[in-house]
Amino acid sequence: MEVFKKAIPISEAIKLSTGYVTVRGWVYRKRVLKEKVFVVLRDSTGIIQLVFPRDRFKIAEELNIESSIVVSGLLVKEPRAPGGVELHVESIDWVYIGEPYPINEDAVTADSEYLLDVRHLWLRSRKMQAVLKIRHTVFEALHHYFRKNGFYEVQAPMFITAAVEGGATLFRVDYFGRPVYLTQSSQFYLEALIYSLEKVYTIAPSFRAEPSRTRRHLTEFWHAEMEMAWASMEDAARVGEEVISYTVEKVLQERGEELKLLGRKTEALEKAKPPFYRVSYDEAIEILRKKGLNINWGDDIGADEERALTLEFDKPIILYGFPEKLKAFYHRNNPQRPEVTLSFDVLLPEGYGEVIGGGERIYDAKELIDKIIRFGLNPEDYQWYIDLRRYGSVPHSGFGLGVDRLVMWITGADHIRDVVPFPRDIRRTKP
Ligand code: 4AD
């Protein structure tokens, strides 16, 4: 069939700029003039202007936006066309006339709820294309970084029975008549796996029954987690700053065009090189109080406080040493100062805030059981997790990185939903 005949990517056609070629894709724009129909054609690589003589190609007038088409013709240099090249169509090899398209990309002040309803179509927009390509590069870079640095990739289950990050955000699932939950984090499984492989990572979905809709919370997000045996909080923090800077660097190198299309200014990205600033929780409280915020030692550093804090610094911050009660039970308390934990968050600049949460884990069985009880939890629920401390326990540390949040910052998006192909939040499970 003609449709399967060899076509070249549009980006390649633009580079060639002369010769007889076949291209295929979807109608992005259309203008009907007296003698010609101008169509901008889009594929996954770019856009090119097609010129149809009206007398020969009656059908060109009927092409609605997003109609699909395969055409052959001659490439001609034309400075006024996007990319400086246009294709003078000689034959239409295949065409599928679409119904009138329900989105006008030029008028996308369009309310975002509508764009979420038609997300299955909106994914075709040049903006989403750029975001998805950056997302692709981010995932690639994360895998690269971990693999190049001696981490084994592992997989953990999504059905679980013990809460990692507290019961309040667990999704309950009916599992053959008994309740199980969707995982909030693969951390406990990674902790088991370090006794086999020492340095492990996984990139997988995590689920949180987040009751509120915010700019940076999803109910299903992509979580890049790592765990290392024989490692301190500072060792984990160093991996955190390295993996972020490595990923940002790769996007800057390979996705300049996409960042430009999104209008992303790159100064802050270029600056995100190790070492990131280290700021203790105590110092953060002081900085925030000096800025006039009403916050005291022991209070949570929420989204607004994080934002205020990141605006004081031109690079990501490693915020460490949180009070015990602000962090999950598994964090090891600082032996020199037991009221604080050996925990850290990485906060992204420009107001974006937390992207990583991690730290050193409790390695002593008794210390762990005591803390589980102190937190009002039942040690029986954590039997296998406690078991890990019974047979040759070692100091170990790790973290979880919210991949969608990292993409959000890199692309400069206002909302986490804008960087996920099919986002899930409290209201939305469709499309
Ligand atoms: O700080 P969190 O809750 O830490 C953990 O889950 C640890 N067990 C991870 C570990 O040490 N292995 O989550 C880690 C990161 C956050 O910093 C954030 O980037 C992201 O996961 N995250 C979310 N992203 C989007 N939507 C949500 N509802 C998120 N909850 C957490």
Image (spheres, rainbow, N blue to C red):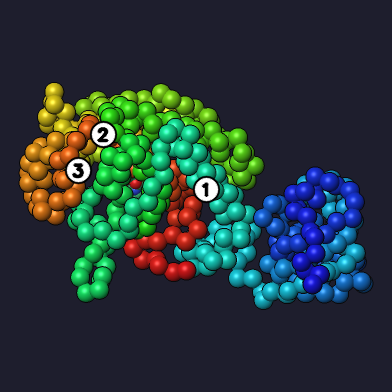
Residue drawn 43% across the image and 25% down it: 274
Which is nearer the N-term, disc 3 or disc 1?
1
Position of residue 415 in the picture relative to residue 302 (left or right): right
In primary-sequence order, the first of circles 1 and 2 is 1
Gap between marks 2 and 3 measured at Cα:
12 Å
Amino acid type indicated by mark 3: Leu
The quadrant of the rendering that contains the N terminus is bottom right
The reply to whether residue 123 is in sight is yes
Q: Could you tell me how far apart the alpha carbons at marks 1 and 2 are, in whole angstroms?
A: 30 Å
Q: Is residue 291 visible?
A: no
Q: Which residue is mark 3?
A: 388
149 shown above or below 192: above
Q: Position of residue 314 (x, y in %)?
A: 43, 27
18 and 301: which one is in front? 18
Mark 3, ligand 1, within 8 Å: the answer is no
**Image position of 235 (left or right of 71):** left
Residue at label 1? 135
Label 1 neighbour load within 10 Å: few <14, some 14-19, many 20+: many
Q: Which is more N-terminal, label 3 or label 2?
A: 3
Picture quadrant of residue 129: bottom right
Of the two numbered discs 1 and 2 in the rendering, the one whose residue sits closer to the viewer: 2
Mark 2 element type:
strand
